[in-house]
Image (cartoon, helix red, strand yellow):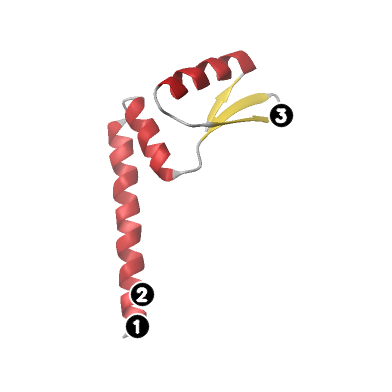
Amino acid sequence: ELTFVSEEERDCVFDILCDNGMSMKKGKRKSRYLLYIKDSTQIEDFFAVIGANKLAFDLMNSKIFIRKCTKRKKYNCNQ
């Protein structure tokens, strides 16, 4: 979630991100204007676009870890 003081700032960043292939949603909470992403794969892409590659890889690794734990849990329950 990205928070902005003005709608113009939010819309400017929205346009820049859309030009880079990102699809974000707009929102408003109280006096703040928001951009947000719900899909974790798009969040990874966002981190990569802004140059936060370590965060992108950390998110990918945590998703892999969760999948492995889920598979292990299912396997153990079936025995």
Q: Tell me which residue sits at (36%, 74%) in the image.
A: 74
Residue that numbered label 1 is attached to: 78
Type of the residue with mark 3: Lys
Is residue 12 visible to us here? yes
Residue 38 in the image: above or below residue 63: above
**Which residue is most to the right?**
30
- Residue 24, x across and y down, in percent: 51, 31
Q: Is residue 64 left or right of residue 30?
A: left
Residue that numbered label 3 is attached to: 30
Residue that numbered label 2 is attached to: 74
- Residue 56, x across and y down, in percent: 32, 38
Q: Residues within 10 Å of mark 3 (few under 14, many from 20)?
A: few
CB-based contact (under 8 Å), mark 2 and mark 1? yes
Q: Quadrant of the C terminus?
A: bottom left
Q: Residues within 10 Å of mark 2 (few under 14, many from 20)?
A: few
Residue 36 in the image: above or below residue 41: above
Type of the residue with mark 1: Asn
Work out how far the residue at label 1 is from the one at label 3, CA to CA, in angstroms: 49 Å
Work out how far the residue at label 2 is from the one at label 1, CA to CA, in angstroms: 6 Å
Q: Tell me which residue sits at (50%, 18%) in the image.
A: 15
CB-based contact (under 8 Å), mark 2 and mark 3? no
Is residue 6 visible to us here? no
